[in-house]
Image: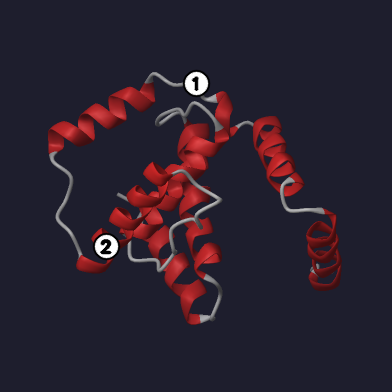
Amino acid sequence: MPEREVIERARRDAQEGKSPSTQAGEFVREEIEHVRQGKHGARSPKQAIAIGLSKARRAGINLPPPKNKKGSRKVRRQAERDLSKGRSGSRKTSPRRSRATTNALRHESRSAASHAALSRQAKSSARKRGPRSRHRAAAKAARTRRT
């Protein structure tokens, strides 16, 4: 269950008109923080991000599933399921399943949320986007940077 402050920050982002992916970023940030604190681990930064996105969808963030080329069929179907659960205000996960998930994640490494691992993930993810898109993002970051 996401913490109350995370949900409030995501709601504030929504009220400010920010994109669903920005709102979901709050949940991803929380998940990375959980791994760093040692609440549980993750096999890779990608897994930590996926858990955060899943929580966001279930919390009601209107984040669409990945496009056909972006994610596998299994990932897309799970994202659709998460999205519908978020829209319907579903019931809680059964205690047994919740405990099993948490115990499985506890056995995983904490290094998935290290600075180096996240940096590698961001770099490889950006590489897929192409130079023009990266240049545009860098120019916007320079323009909108707080001084």
Residue at 33%, 66% in the rendered image: 60
Residue mark closest to the camera, 1 vs 2 = 2
Q: Specify whether residue 33 is in view.
A: no
Looking at the image, is mark 1 or mark 2 earlier in the sequence? 2
Residue at 48%, 33% in the rendered image: 35
Up-down: is 13 above or below 97?
Answer: below
User: Which quadrant of the view contains residue 116?
Assistant: top right
Q: Specify whether residue 135 is in view.
A: yes
**The C terminus is located in which quarter?**
bottom right
Residue at 80%, 57% in the rendered image: 134
Q: Which amino acid does label 2 sit on?
A: Ser
User: Which quadrant of the view contains residue 38?
Assistant: top left
Q: What residue type is labelled 1?
A: Ser
Which of the labelled discs sits on residue 84, or is there none? 2
Q: Is mark 2 on a helix, strand or loop?
A: helix
Which of the labelled discs sits on residue 77, or is there none? none
Q: Is residue 123 left or right of residue 13?
A: right
Residue at mark 1: 109
